[in-house]
Image (tube, rainbow, N blue to C red):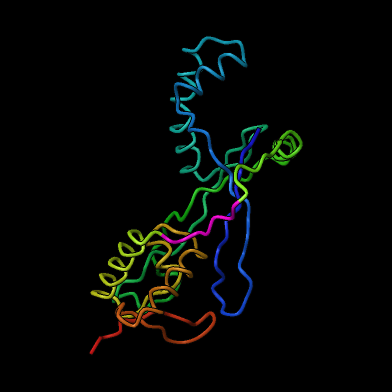
Amino acid sequence: MLNYHIQELPSLQQDSEETVFPKLDSYSQFGNKKMIKRIAMEAGVNEGVVMATLDALPHALKNILLEGHTCKIDGLGTFSLSLAFEAKTDEEETSEPNHRKVMINRLNLKVDSAFLRELRKEAQFVRNDSRIVAVRPSKGHLEEHLCLAIKWFDTHQMLTLQEYANMTGVSRSTASRELKQITDNPNSGISTQGQGNRKVWVRAFLD
C-alpha cells in the first residue's frame, strides 16, 4: 500500500494556475543489509552470495560504462551515460564547441517497460492527508546556491541556465525557478540579459 499526499507548486508565470501533483510518502530507505535479506529470502539463496553480488555490482557497472558500453539488467532497465560541456573558462569563451571540455552530466536509467507495467498494475494508493501542502523552496539551499552563483562571476562574465544547474546539482526546471527567485530580489546582485534561448544571467552591481 502506497501512501501519498497532494502538493501545490506555485507557477512561475503570473496570473496562471498553480500546479497540483501527488507526492509519495516514503516509509524508509532500504540499505544493503535489508536488501541482502530481502533478495536472499525471495531468491532462496545464501545471504553471503547476495552480499558479494551487490558489492561487485557498482564496480562492474562503473567499468562497463567507462568502456563505452550501456548496461542492460533484464527486468530492471538499461544504464547509460549522458554528456555535457564543462563550464567555459575565460580563455574558452571564444573557442569552438569541438574544442570545449566534455564531462559526464548524469547516469541514466531507462526502466524496463515490463517492470514499469507491473508496478503500475500492482500499486494501490491511499491518500494520507486531506490537506494540500504548499511547496516552498529551502531558503538555506537557495542562499547556498546564490553564493555559488556570485562566486562564479569572479571568473566568468555570464552564467547560463545549464551552467547553474550543473554547478548546484539541480534540474533545469529547478534551476529556472531558483534563478527567477534570485533575480526577482533587487538586492541579489544578479540580473538577466537576453530572452528565450539566449537568456543569460550576469553580475548586477548594487548602488
**Farthest residue, direction bottom:** 207
Give the residue displayed 49% in from the left and 33% down from the top.
28
State the residue in front, 64 or 88.
88
Q: Nearer the viewer, residue 113 or 204?
A: 204
Q: Which quarter of the rendering shows the N terminus? A: top right
Percent position (x, y) of residue 59?
43, 32
- The location of residue 146, given as percent across then percent down, is 32, 68
In-image side of 35 versus 88 (left or right):
right
Instruction: Name the side, left or right, on which 49 lies relative to 187.
Output: right
Residue drawn at 45 percent across, 19 percent down: 52
Where 141 sits versus 13, above or below?
A: above
- Residue under the point 71% across and 36% down: 124
List x then y, in percent, for residue 143: 31, 65
Q: Which residues are magenta?
A: 131-137
Count of number-bearing discs = 0
Q: Residue 136: within the magenta? A: yes
Across and down, in percent, residue 158 comes to 35, 79
- The extreme front residue here reads 130
Q: Quadrant of residue 2?
A: top right
User: Is 12 above or below relative to 171?
Assistant: below
Tell me the quadrant of the picture where the C terminus can be found.
bottom left
* Residue 25 location, quadrant: top right
Q: Residue at x 30, y 62 (%)?
A: 144
- Looking at the image, residue 168 sits to the left or right of residue 34; the answer is left
111 magenta-colored: no
